[in-house]
Image (cartoon, rainbow, N blue to C red):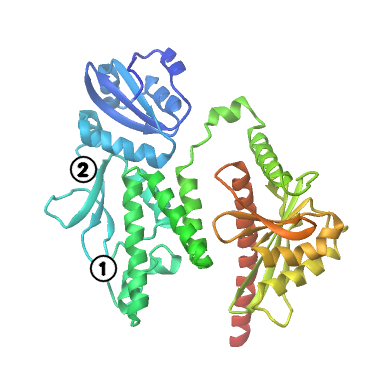
Amino acid sequence: MQSKLEFSKNRKILTNLPQSAGVYLFWSGEQIIYVGKALNLKNRVSSYLSWDLAPKTKAMVQEANKLSYIRVDSEIDSLLLESSLIKKYQPRYNFAAKDDKNPLYIRITKEEYPKVLTARKIDEYQKNISFYGPFPSSASVRSVLKMLRRIFTYSDHKISNKACMYSHLNLCSPCPSAIEKESNSKIKKDLKRIYLKNIGMLKLVLERKSSKVERELLLAMEHLSKEKRYEEAKMIRNQLMQLYYVTQKPIPALEFLKNPNLVIDIRNREIKELKNILLKHIYVEKLERIECYDVAHLAGTNPTASMVTFIKAEAEKSLYRRFRIFQKFPKSDVDSLNEVAKRRIKHLYDWGKPDLIIVDGGKPQVSVFNKWFEGRGIPVVGIAKRYETLVVPVKILGRSGYKQIRLIQGPALMLITRIRDEAHRFSRAYHHLLVKKTIESQFS
């Protein structure tokens, strides 16, 4: 915690406050009288310097004579830290500001399939594994739970005869109701383990132990990859990337005002880092235009592929292309990509020439694309399903080989995953469209 600043309705205090997320504390003498959270500490505290305040807020500001703050890296951290400080110090203005309305808690029940619920009151005799709060802002609580549910899915309902509505949205997956209906004991055991693992991860995040969650996810992803369980590893990777996203440090709004080209600068850093990584293994002249390819199908039906194009690290949708696959073995991603590469090279000049091609896949996928483009001086790399790994074709003692480069969190990884995820989204969208048309034709 920063040392306490003398507080008065003088705007000079703002010069000592950062433009970042955090928690601020108002003091009266040696007593904490109010705790609040902010995505931008400087902007939030400045709102208390207004003369147009609600009566209770005005009374708190008049009583306060000191201010301190604690910087954090994300909205989730600020919400959880605010809650823990309110619980510890019981500042009277936090409760007075709610007009005697009970604050909100997050409650995790103690049962075979723990539920994640919100509650206005917590009875110590209730069956709770744990509870978190109080949280003064119910809107913030629900916003954070909504973000976390996309990463670590959970149930908030009793077990019934069929899977819940949220299971169809992958927000309660695996759904306890569906698990209980599973007749295969091994599958049932595995699904239950996944569900309880999600609850455990969610608890760690709510306890402000995100770094531990990240380490556990990385270890799990590595273990699954070594066992060649790539689809499961990919699911873990997606959880990890979403966790990075919701816990990442926000860019202060003032930074955009101070530097109108901030986004361009960020994109340039992404390109520069990726180029420096690639130059250690292959030659790339520039990375102004990057194309990425992905294949989508369901058990070989309605196979499609996508080509997305990024210019200076920004999506250029006018240059996107989609491909319907016509080859005889639609279940083979390699054969599908070979067809796409053959069709793409026919349009090398009228569609434009890329500086780099990224293929969603490993050595086989990279190999088939590289076969068509290597002679044209266009480098091809893959992004493997096992943790974020670049697969780069190289020459080793005159022979063709592959270098695997594991990307660490940073600008290059953010660029690669943004491009790859967009290619995946675009290919799935076309695939779903074709599936819909197929179904409609059967009933017309």
User: What residue appears at the point 81 percent right and 54 percent down from the top-left corner?
Assistant: 378
In this view, the residue in front, 220 or 210, is 220
User: What residue appears at the point 54 percent right and 31 percent down from the top-left corner?
Assistant: 253
Query: Does residue 298 appear left or right of residue 271 in this picture?
Result: left
Quarter of the image with the N terminus in it: top left
Quarter of the image with the C terminus in it: bottom right
Kind of residue at badge 2: Asn
On the image, the x and y values in percent for residue 349 come to: 88, 57
In this view, the residue in front, 218 or 167, is 218
Mark seen at residue 237: none
Query: Does residue 160 appear left or right of residue 385 in this picture?
Result: left
- Res. 130 in view: yes
In this view, the residue in front, 85 or 191, is 191
- Res. 444 in view: no
Residue density around tag 1, few if under 14, some if 14–19, many if 20 or more, within 10 Å: few
Disc 1: which residue? 158
Q: Which element carries disc 1, helix, strand or loop?
A: loop
On the image, the x and y values in percent for residue 413 come to: 60, 47
Residue density around tag 2, few if under 14, some if 14–19, many if 20 or more, within 10 Å: some
Kind of residue at badge 1: Lys
Q: Is residue 72 above or below residue 246?
A: above
Query: Does residue 285 appear left or right of residue 162 in this picture?
Result: right
Nearer the viewer's eye, disc 2 or disc 1? Answer: 1
On the image, the x and y values in percent for residue 230 come to: 53, 66
Q: Is residue 227 above or below residue 105?
A: below
Give the quarter of the image for residue 82.
top left
Disc 2: which residue? 102
Most distant residue in the right direction: 349
User: What residue appears at the point 79 percent right and 53 percent down from the top-left corner?
Assistant: 354
